Image: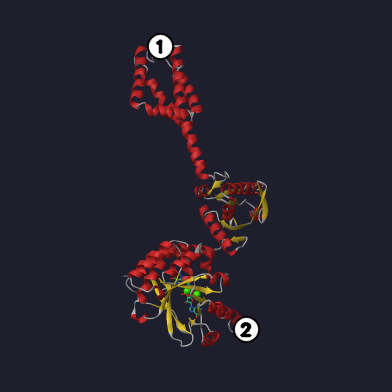
Amino acid sequence: MELFRIKSFRDRLSPLIVGFMLSLATALFVYYTGGTTNVYTNLMYIPIALVSSIYGYKWGLVHATISGFLVGPFMPQNVLTGTTQSLPNWIIRVLTYAIIAFIIGLFADLAHKRELKISFMLSHDPDTGLKNYEALRSENMLSEQPITFISLSVTDYQEYLGFFGYDFFQRIVRVFSDKLTEVLKPFPNAEVYSYYGLEFAVKVIHEEDEPNTENILSAIYTLNERTISVMHVPVYIEFRIGIATLSPEEVPIDGVRRSLVALRDAVRSNTRLVRFTGEMEALFKSSVSIASGFRDALKKGNIRTAYQTIHDSGSGETVGIELLARWIRDDDTRIAPDVFVPVLEKTELIHDLTDFMFERALSLSVNPEYRGKYIGINFSASDFNEQTILSLVRKAKERGVNPERIHIEITERVLLSVANIRAHLDLLHNHGFVIVIDDFGTGYSSYGYVSDLPIDVIKIDRSLIMKANTPKGFGLVRSIVDFCGKFDMVTVAEGIENKDYADICDELGIDQQQGYFYSLPEILPIMPIP
Ligand code: C2E
Ligand code: CA
Ligand code: CA
């Protein structure tokens, strides 16, 4: 309120007028009190202003009083003549000093308070009051003791948000964070931080003797797989933990990152606790270098296209090809697509790869060598958005390619993970593209679900084909072939490595086959992008 008033006063009056009026009044005062003999006592304002603006009004007042006394009763008015000062003279000076110190100090205090509030807001989570990631990040001083970071994430916590809404979710967060802080109270060397929502970190500074991390973990686990009461609603809490220990000379933020890498592993493998290992560090580093090096590799021509032929089961004739991405480094070493594709899929870079492969598919489909053969390319989950699909449709049209020549392969996993997949498949299908389910048999999609979607081809995964030489495996693949027959879907067997399997697949009535028995993936020469 005071601040507001001062501010509006400041906005309304020009500093020139205010300053001039104040100075004029002071000048008149000096004149009527006998002139400028006392001018050097004014120097005292400098230390007073400095002390008040740095230490606030309380210290400012103390300092002003001391200063007033220094040039007060012990100071003659004129050192040469030895005349003493009158009492009112130095008392008024002390008061003036005090008022000045108070005003400067008060403003300095207000500014300092505001600064503290802002820095508190930046370094704390507003809902739990706990320190946040930013606070962890700025604590970059090296520790004398080893530090363990425990990162914790409540499983599927976003679902609570979806089920109960934001307000109730915030209450869950508060109740859980209070409980976490409570169970860690007996451990003064453990501090709780909040990342976001139901994700927390616990920083444990090891004590001289025994690190008590195991006890701390046990305390945290008293909250796992338990029900907590939030506004009388029993909410089931289950969490995963990633843990990393840093030696003294390492930077704390690296420990946070490592515990998060371990946490990611715990969430992915559905394991209660994962400890950070050197292999994870290598994986992390390679993921970063893949993501940061991909565009450059694409520009330099290090991303190449390989193709593998697909054959008719009866005649053995080539009916189509599948394009597979290859990354060949300058030193001729390779990065396997199983390694780089999942990293690209976590970023927007996967669109660059899909675009590149799609361009190749279009070029090959107009190449006389591949006349009458279809070209298969692999799609990732994030390729399923209207914008990407429509741009592919447009590109095919521009190049005069019949979309029926392009087979779009998507894995069962993608089929199940993309929201509204039916609309996207319909869009592709209505524009004439052929939809292929890749790695069929490795996911959990049901026949009912698959038969309901516009799917033209099913590629039976190599893991199922390999079991087809046993009665049980044979029966399983037969049931897939029967199902596809009923819904007019073409079947392709993947991973045919020898004639025995080729014959079994023929016997099973599988339409087409792909694998090392027929051909190895072969790298295509670099083609200019039209
Ligand atoms: P996929 O789509 O299932 O591709 C077939 C994989 O099986 C290829 O591995 C191929 O080289 C391999 N293969 C072919 N015949 C045989 C065989 O007889 N035996 C065995 N054991 N393997 C065989 P590759 O090229 O290493 O690709 C691995 C995966 O990477 C692909 O699996 C696909 O999921 C992904 N991928 C490759 N290129 C791309 C791409 O351009 N985009 C996307 N999104 N994914 C790609
Ligand atoms: Ca494929
Ligand atoms: Ca496959």
Q: Earlier in the sequence, mark 2 or mark 1?
A: 1
Q: Secondary structure at mark 1?
A: loop
Residue 167 is situated, as x and y percent measured from the top left of the image, at 58, 46
At 37% across and 74% down in the image, what residue appears?
402
Q: Which residue is mark 2?
A: 471
Counting labels gives 2
Q: Indicate whether 346 appears above or below 176.
A: below
Q: Is residue 302 visible?
A: no
Residue 62 is situated, as x and y percent measured from the top left of the image, at 50, 25
- Local crowd at mark 1 within 10 Å, few (<14), some, or many (≥20)? few
Residue 398 is situated, as x and y percent measured from the top left of the image, at 33, 69
Q: Quadrant of residue 357?
A: bottom left
For badge 2, the amino acid type reads Pro
Q: Which residue is mark 1?
A: 83
Split into 4 quadrants, where in the image is the C terminus? bottom left
- In front here: 167 or 100? 167
At 45% across and 16% down in the image, what residue appears?
92
What mark, if any, has residue 348 been given in the picture? none
User: In this image, 477 relative to 307: left or right?
Assistant: right
Q: Secondary structure at mark 2?
A: helix
Q: Is residue 361 visible?
A: yes
For badge 1, the amino acid type reads Thr
- Local crowd at mark 2 within 10 Å, few (<14), some, or many (≥20)? few
CB at disc 2 and ligand 1 closer than 8 Å? no
In space, the residues marked 2 and 1 are separated at their CA atoms by 122 Å
Residue 270 is situated, as x and y percent measured from the top left of the image, at 60, 63
At 59% across and 49% down in the image, what residue appears?
169
Which coloring applies here?
secondary structure
